[in-house]
Image: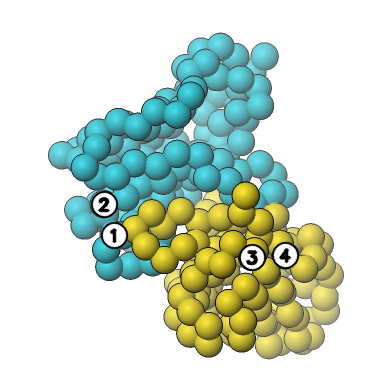
Amino acid sequence: DVKVTQSSRYLVKRTGEKVFLECVQDMDHENMFWYRQDPGLGLRLIYFSYDVKMKEKGDIPEGYSVSREKKERFSLILESASTNQTSMYLCASSLAGRSQTQYFGPGTRLLVL
Amino acid sequence: DQQVKQNSPSLSVQEGRISILNCDYTNSMFDYFLWYKKYPAEGPTFLISISSIKDKNEDGRFTVFLNKSAKHLSLHIVPSQPGDSAVYFCAAVNAGNNRKLIWGLGTSLAVNP
């Protein structure tokens, strides 16, 4: 059974702080993804990674960076948090290949004050 | 430009009846489609998928139908149960060329007892 875990369920930060969101998957998946979900906007892809140390920008990468030093771990970094980054952040992973089924973590609800 | 559209933001159904959730897409290169279910404050969970070489896939109470000529797919839930109340997301991918899923904005289903 695939398990994707995220470091925090709820997080409160102040404007300008550097924020780290961690994601770990235990199924040896090659691909990992970071999304944010906002009401009425669905799931928007921030960054994804298809291999260790590899990353690609998604649809809304501005204000974010990522790190993938190990296959099982994918970190999302908010270099200087802003109030418009208040959101639900979702991490997902998937095997390389055609099925493209992504498995999600429980999400981190981030509030930036 | 939404390549995957879920035109009904919400749907209300009586328990025991059929729920039909619809999804339209514009990119004829999509060849794999997925449905996810999401409860509040949780990550999406994979529900069912269909390859473009098929027109129907069934898993218990859930059936997905694909009409390629109309670029339309639908998810049928029979019989609907109160526990099915959630947001349902449709997603599509050109599995041969891309690792990214393209997501619809979701339909919120309420199943009333």
**Which chain does the numbered disc 1 sit on?**
B
Vertical arrangement, residue B7 with respect to residue A110, above or below: above
Residues under numbered marks 3 and 4 in contact, where contact means CB atoms less than 8 Å apart: no
Q: Quadrant of residue A81?
A: bottom right
The residue pinned by badge 1 equals B94
Mark 3 neighbour class, 10 Å CA radius: few under 14, some 14 to 19, many 20 or more: many
Q: Residue at position x 79%, y 65% from top?
A: A8
**For the residues marked 1 and 2, what is the alpha-carbon distance in whole angstroms?**
5 Å
Residue located beneath label 2 in the image: B31
SS at mark 4 in the image: strand
- Protein chain holding label 3: A
Q: Do labels 1 and 2 share a chain?
A: yes
Q: Which chain is yellow?
A: A
How far apart are the two marked residues, 2 and 4, measured between alpha carbons? 31 Å
Q: In the rendered image, which residue does mark 4 sit on?
A: A6
Chain B, which colour?
A: cyan
Q: How far apart are marks 1 and 3 (CA)?
A: 24 Å
Q: Residue at x 62, y 81 (%)?
A: A70
Residues at circles 1 and 2 in contact by the CB criterion of under 8 Å: yes
Q: Is residue B50 visible?
A: yes
Which amino acid lies under the numbered mark 4 shown in the image of this protein?
Gln
Q: Do labels 2 and 4 share a chain?
A: no
Quarter of the figure that contains the C terminus of chain B: top right
Q: Mark 3 points at which residue?
A: A25
Instruction: Answer with the quarter of the image where residue B20 lies.
Output: top left
Q: Is residue A66 visible?
A: no
> Decide: marks 4, 1 in contact (CB < 8 A)?
no
Crowd band around label 1 with a 10 angstrom C-alpha radius: few (<14), some (14–19), many (20+): some
Q: Do labels 3 and 4 share a chain?
A: yes
Q: What residue type is labelled 3?
A: Gln
